[in-house]
Amino acid sequence: AQKITQTQPGMFVQEKEAVTLDCTYDTSDPSYGLFWYKQPSSGEMIFLIYQGSYDQQNATEGRYSLNFQKARKSANLVISASQLGDSAMYFCAMREGDPNDYKLSFGAGTTVTVRA
Amino acid sequence: GAGVSQSPRYKVAKRGQDVALRCDPISGHVSLFWYQQALGQGPEFLTYFQNEAQLDKSGLPSDRFFAERPEGSVSTLKIQRTQQEDSAVYLCASSPRTSGSYNEQFFGPGTRLTVL
């Protein structure tokens, strides 16, 4: 079964507007971490934001915020005030807390195109 | 530059050739990961090193894939007798930590392998 599901293959957003990227996850581990990465056309994965399963507040990092709904197992990324440079592929990923499980499990990604 | 570097950035191989992909992690990072990213997909875990020890190789798709990190720093991913299905971007990531759900991974730019 897929651990991370991103249902939006592509999205268009107008410059200066906000966009929400959906991510749902599946785990039975009570301890886990959720990550969002940005991958521009250059290929490098850029870390954006992190949310721990025990964190009480939603994570925020500049223009990025994470809408964490634990009961629904969703961790949506909100990008506010979109800029042309935000055009990229965005990946949601999870690391489960099992000490023997180190890897990140990624979703299929969402392509965001910001229009001027 | 103190980031993760990978070489070569691009590699074209004829089917049946052996290839070696190099990763230089961030200095002092204990953990090193290899991921395979097919076109239009999210990265898939291949293998994990903690220092020189390969603790998880469950994601390696076949015995043609081999990875090493003999001195706990630079790592090499080797693919023997390449097949067309091996065509992908191979991403390397490193992390300063070994455990805990918060374990940000810093990614390199990747090596794009094309097998003809």
Image (spheres, rainbow, N blue to C red):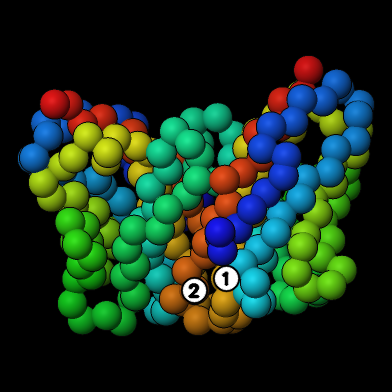
> Quadrant location of residue A49?
bottom left
Q: Where does the image place residue B14, in percent across and percent down from the top left?
A: 85, 21
The answer to whether marks 1 and 2 sit on the same chain is yes
Tell me the residue that label 2 is attached to: B103
Residue drawn at point x = 27 percent, y = 38 percent: A85
Q: Tell me: A102 left or right of A66.
A: right
User: Pointer 2 indicates a residue of which chain?
Assistant: B
Q: Where does the image place residue B70, in percent across and percent down from the top left?
A: 87, 68
The answer to whether the residue labelled 1 contacts the one labelled 2, judged by CB atoms less than 8 Å apart, is: yes
> Quadrant location of residue B80?
top right
Residue drawn at point x = 57 percent, y = 71 percent: B95
Visible in this render: residue A25? no
Label 2 secondary element: loop
The numbered mark, 1 or 2, whose residue comes first in the sequence reads 1
Q: Where does the image place residue B41, in percent across and percent down from the top left?
A: 50, 36
Q: Tell me: A30 left or right of A76.
A: right
Question: Which of the labelled discs sits on residue B95, or is there none?
Answer: 1
Q: Tell me: A48 left or right of A39.
A: left
